[in-house]
Image (spheres, rainbow, N blue to C red):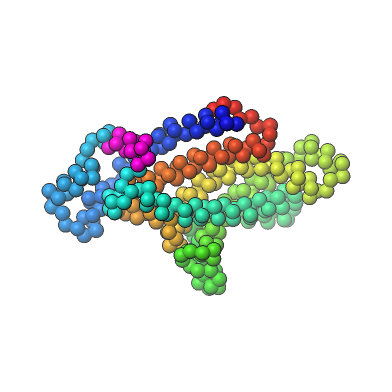
Amino acid sequence: MLRYLAGRMILTIPVLVGAAILIFLLMQLVPGDAVSAVMAGGAKLSPEQQLEMREALGLNRPLVVQLGDYLWGLVQGDLGRSTRSDRTVISLVGAQISSTLILVAAGMAVALLIGVPLGVLAARRRNTLVDTAAMGTAVLGLSIPQFWLGLMLILLFAVNLGWFPALSSGGFRALVLPALALGLAEAAVLARLVRSSLIESLEQDYTTTARAKGASDRRITWRHGLPNALVPVVTMIGLQVGNLMGAAVVIEMLFARPGLGQLVVNSILRRDLPVLQGSILILAAIFVFINLAVDVIYKFLDPRVELGAA
């Protein structure tokens, strides 16, 4: 296990370096720069002042030199400084990332609490009206865009009923609606996957043996069937966390919730590329380590899985 973890940790280095290079090059395709963003905000700069500002920010250097400096800074743990506030990117991201991770965790909790029981119910009552209703609900959840669902949740539960605040300013009640908007679509995915995986698991020989020994259907489902059915589900959860981190940007803006979403959008509007690069790179690093954790969880769910040398 330790050898495998060490090998995987080593392999994350070229993955993150490749991600950093790709993100840097993509940022160069963003029209304009920090100087043009300042002028768009109403500042009047002479051509000489614009040249001096680009010189100070290093924007007039060759692209290869800028990339080299950026990678060397990453090696030293330096993600750069904001071109607008002159604060370090790490401090800006660090002040916002906890809010985003809390929202992603809440959205994933909603997906698990709704999707897994719904999938189990559909599998136990397959080819019945209950199964059809459960899967119909799942298809509906997949079909509704998250931002539209968020608007409908605000309209119903915040504006009409007044149960929850419309703006997610803090506290548990303010987290409910954003978490629902974020997690319901992923719950639909989990429900469909749990259903198909559990049906396959319940048709295996070990469940037939347990049934022959007099085990109840409930025990067979939860004790024998579901643990084996969760192995592909864990893979999907790892992918869903990545989806949730991306969708959290939209949900945070919709509910005026502080987090990386507002930081990313503001950095795009201000052409603050160091902050934008650092935010995306940190999200990519989180996704890489989540996938490493998923591989390790495999071993605990299914001892037959061999974690070979990376």
For residue 81, side relative to residue 105 (left or right):
left
Q: Is residue 229 magenta?
A: no
Q: Is residue 182 left or right of residue 40?
A: right
The main secondary structure of the magenta stretch is helix
Answer yes or no: is residue 189 visible.
yes
Is residue 142 something that shows in the picture?
no
Q: Which residue is pictured at 43% across the width and 62% down the height? A: 256
Magenta stretch bounds: 66-78
- In the image, 36 versus 133, the foreground residue is 36
* Residue under the image location 21 percent in, 60 percent down: 42
Quarter occupied by the N terminus: top right
Left or right of 192, for residue 249: left
Label count reads 0
Please determine whether, in this image, residue 65 is positioned above or below residue 50. above
Which is nearer the eye, 279 or 189? 279
Whether 77 is among the magenta residues is yes
**Residue at image location 53% in from the left, 42% down from the top:** 290
